[in-house]
Amino acid sequence: AATFVRALDALHAGEPVLVHDAADREGETDLIYHADAVTPEAVARLRNDAGGLVCTALGHEIAEAFDLPLYTEAIDHPAAGCHNLGYDERSSFSLTVNHRETYTGITDVDRSRTIRALGEAAAAPEAVEFAAEFRVPGHVHLLKAAPDLLAQREGHTELGVALAEAADLSPAVVVCEMLDDETGEALTPVDARAYADRHDFVYLEGRTVLEHLG
Ligand code: 5RP
Ligand code: ZN
Ligand code: CA
Ligand code: ZN
């Protein structure tokens, strides 16, 4: 229990947590922040220390309120027809966005601007006209959580959104895979845990999240 509560406290305090999904799923550890906490310095940590794709996961209802479809529903292309992923039934990718007040959208300052605006929007969706505030395509990948969250899907998308909700935060988190520059593979759980220890960040196994929230 101690680690789980520490993870909620960390998210609340704007610190990242590390979450390894499962050896029999992706077998990846994502660095996760609540969207409100994603300063330009946090984006720099995500791209330098994690190195994967910087994505913002939104709760299903929020995504629906903003009319955000799954990517595969949005485009009519034969390559989007059949998923056959090795680790899940479907991807959670939605559209990509930039805040309209960004320039190129990719800099740490721009991505932070976009991500924090997504966090604010998720806290008060009724106050936001999504298309007036964001443009598509952009440099932040949106992920859309499953309607029944962890009961339906056990990806980092749902693990992250469930943690935010449990921490009493809006359902918007940033997730980015921890990659290994030496091997070219995902960072192993042992190395991800060592990174967490070095920085005094919490490392969680997906199953610990499922035990508390699943
Ligand atoms: C986007 C991904 C990551 O795995 C991310 O963790 C979200 O996906 P999932 O919910 O399937 O784990 O593919 O970079
Ligand atoms: Zn993935
Ligand atoms: Ca790196
Ligand atoms: Zn993942």
Image (spheres, helix red, strand yellow):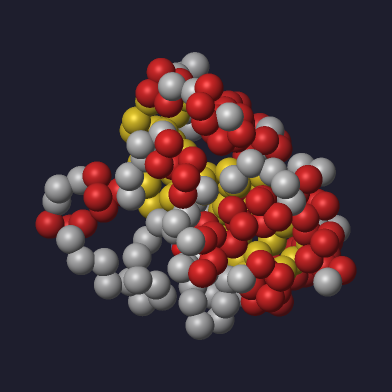
Determine whether 213 is above or below 190 in the image: above
The C terminus sits in image quarter = bottom right
Viewport quadrant of the N terminus = bottom right
Q: Position of residue 23 (x, y in %)?
A: 56, 81
Give above or below for 46 relative to 105: below
- Residue occupying image coordinates x 52% and y 57%: 157
Q: Quick check: 138 left or right of 176?
A: left
- Residue 130 left/right relative to 137: right
Residue 52 location (% of width, % of height):
52, 55
Percent x, y of residue 39: 68, 33
Q: How many marks?
A: 0
Foreground pick, 151 / 30: 151
The residue at the far bottom in this view is: 24
Tell me where residue 134 sits by quadrant.
top left
The relative height of residue 106 versus residue 60 in the rendered view (above or below) is above
Left or right of 94, for residue 117: right
Q: Nearer the viewer, residue 206 or 140?
A: 206
Residue 90 in sight from this viewpoint? yes
Query: Residue 70 location, x and y as percent?
Result: 33, 50
Task: Look at 54% across and 75% down and name the residue there.
Answer: 27
Q: Is residue 111 visible?
A: no
At a point 51% along the width and 46% down the height, the residue shown is: 58
Q: Nearer the viewer, residue 146 or 188?
A: 146
Left-right relation of 4 to 27: right
